[in-house]
């Protein structure tokens, strides 16, 4: 019987985040409470989102709209590293939001340790940016997935590369 495996990675589906940004920008453009604030929700680089508006409270409100759209697209809010609002030119405020794309080393070590503690016949391998879990029984692998999903981690974990 061949070994099956899967990877545990930190990160999100960038297309889903892009869709959420576009939906939030459309909603902000049409809502009355954002009228004449020139509120902008857009990408600022590969892994960062920029929310800018006329005042700090409008930035916070636009950020809430963005969070709502991200949750509706089934993307974890743990994937967002939200900065503090700061003043920019002409009395406007801005918040920079970075996407979490890498698994912290201490989290990877803790997940590997938890997997080994289950005493299931699987082999977790820390590969730096991801953890590969291999085993002969698919039921054991599904049990590991349920255990990792059930634990409350500080990173948006996803399971990929099923073999």
Image (cartoon, grey):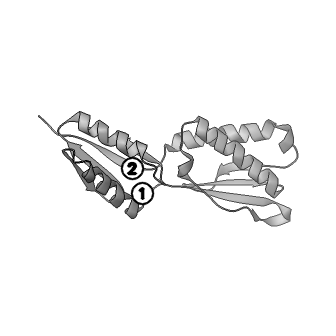
Residue 98 visible in the picture = yes
Tell me whether circle 1 and circle 2 mark residues in contact (CB < 8 Å): yes
Q: CA distance from mark 1 to mark 2?
A: 7 Å
Residue at image position (35%, 48%) is: 8
Q: Position of residue 152 (x, y in %)?
A: 46, 49
Horizontal side, residue 34 vs residue 82: left or right: right
- Could you tell which of marks 1 and 2 lies nearer the N-terminus? 2
Q: How many marks?
A: 2
Q: Position of residue 28 (x, y in %)?
A: 77, 41
Q: Is residue 38 above or below residue 86?
A: above
- Secondary structure category for the residue under label 1: loop
In which quadrant will I find the N terminus? top left
What residue is shown with label 1? 103
Horizontal side, residue 137 vs residue 152: left or right: left
Q: Is residue 86 above or below residue 15?
A: below
Horizontal side, residue 90 vs residue 160: left or right: right
Residue at image position (76%, 53%) is: 59
Q: Which mark is residue 9?
A: 2
Residue at image position (18%, 44%) is: 121
Q: Quadrant of residue 161?
A: top left
Check the image and name the residue furthest to the right: 36
In which quadrant will I find the C terminus? top left
- Secondary structure category for the residue under label 2: strand
Q: Is residue 28 above or below residue 47?
A: above
Mark 2: few/some/many CA within 10 Å (<14, 14-19, 20+): many
Q: Position of residue 48 (x, y in %)?
A: 59, 56
Mark 1: few/some/many CA within 10 Å (<14, 14-19, 20+): many
């Amino acid at each position: 019987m061949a070994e099956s495996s899967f990877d545990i990675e930190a990160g999100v589906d960038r297309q889903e985040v892009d869709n959420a940004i576009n939906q939030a920008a459309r909603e902000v453009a049409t809502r009355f409470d954002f009228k004449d604030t020139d509120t902008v929700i857009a990408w600022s680089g590969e892994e960062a989102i920029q929310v800018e508006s006329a005042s700090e409270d409008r930035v916070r409100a636009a950020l809430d709209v963005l969070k709502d759209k991200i949750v509706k697209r089934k993307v974890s809010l743990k994937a967002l590293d939200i900065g503090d609002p700061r003043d920019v030119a002409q009395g406007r405020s801005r918040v920079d939001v970075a996407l979490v794309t890498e698994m912290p080393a201490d989290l990877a070590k803790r997940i590997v340790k938890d997997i080994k503690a289950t005493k299931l016949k699987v082999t977790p391998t820390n590969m730096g940016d991801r953890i590969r879990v291999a085993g002969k029984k698919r039921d054991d692998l599904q049990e590991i997935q349920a255990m990792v999903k059930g634990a409350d981690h500080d990173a948006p974990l996803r399971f990929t590369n099923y073999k």
